[in-house]
Image (spheres, helix red, strand yellow):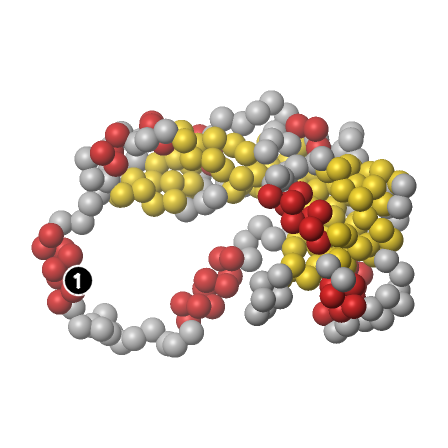
Amino acid sequence: MKLEVNVRKAEEDVDELRSESKIPGIIYGGKRPESTSITIDRGVFLKLRKQSTESTVIDVDVDGDVVKALIGEIQYHPISDEIIHVDMRQVEAGKKVKARIKLNFVGESPAVKTGGLIVQNRDFVQVIALPADLPEAIEVDLSVLVEYEQGVHIGDLNLPEGVDVQEDDRVSIVVIRPPKKLEDIEADLASPVGDDGGDAPVGEEGEEGKEGEGEGDAKDGDKPAEDGKEKGDDKKGDK
């Protein structure tokens, strides 16, 4: 896949660029001595995003200089949900990189046919590999789950050659839970709110959710410190 971007000058107004259907961003990493501010055509990037994953190696043309890169962090507008900033992480052919790989669930669990419930705990896994060896996705075969409480863990994954997982093998990906009995459902419905000693503080669950959503977003220290400043300035409408 290919993507053409333009080097963005410091004096360019990022809000004005966004009004022109352009996305401000940066490209960093690899042999690049420091991050470079760039501008990406919004329509082109949205099309590319639909056809790629976080592990897709893209040929990025930076004003005529073609380099290999992965799509990094994407920032969204809190109200419109439009993309407002994109990070591109440059990689080198002979150097291993860390990346998140999407998990594709295939097959059907025999335990589900008898009433079992699938509980999915993960939809990605962190790996390290050469850029050329990064897979688009890793399959998780559900047909091996024939009994309740049986599951698939990271250590059970069938990894492509040259790909190593960077997580604990014991981490659960998916598990089959038995169906609830009717009396248990009726008991749950009959239990008054706060019967377990009081209601949880308002907002506590939401905070935990936020922490979960952030998992895996960091790029393992590959991202330069100045990047945070760059994006913070963008949000303020730097010139």
Farthest-out residue, top? 161
* Residue type beneath disc 1: Asp
Q: Position of residue 204 (x, y in %)?
A: 42, 71
- Local crowd size for mark 1, using a 10 Å CA cut-off: few (<14), some (14–19), many (≥20): few
Choose between 211 and 238: the one closer to the eye: 238
Q: Which residue sits at x=47%, y=68%?
A: 207
Say which quarter of the image contains residue 15. Answer: bottom right
Q: Is residue 63 left or right of residue 148?
A: right
Q: Is residue 176 left or right of residue 186?
A: right
* Placement of 183 over or under 30, stated as above or below: below
Q: Which residue sits at x=38%, y=40%?
A: 174
Q: Which residue sits at x=42%, y=74%?
A: 203
Q: Position of residue 120 (x, y in %)?
A: 38, 44
Q: Quadrant of the C terminus?
A: bottom right
Visible in this render: residue 213? Answer: yes
Q: Quadrant of the N terminus?
A: top right
Q: Secondary structure at mark 1?
A: helix
Q: Which residue sits at x=58%, y=63%?
A: 81
Choose between 59 and 195: the one closer to the eye: 59
Say which quarter of the image contains residue 140. Answer: top left
* Placement of 66 over or under 188, stated as above or below: above
Q: Is residue 87 left or right of residue 169?
A: right
Disc count in the image?
1
* Placement of 169 over or under 133, stated as above or below: below
Q: Position of residue 86 (x, y in %)?
A: 71, 55
Q: Position of residue 62 (x, y in %)?
A: 85, 45
Visible in this render: residue 233? Answer: no
Choose between 10 and 33: the one closer to the eye: 10
Residue marked by disc 1: 188
Q: Is residue 84 left or right of residue 205?
A: right
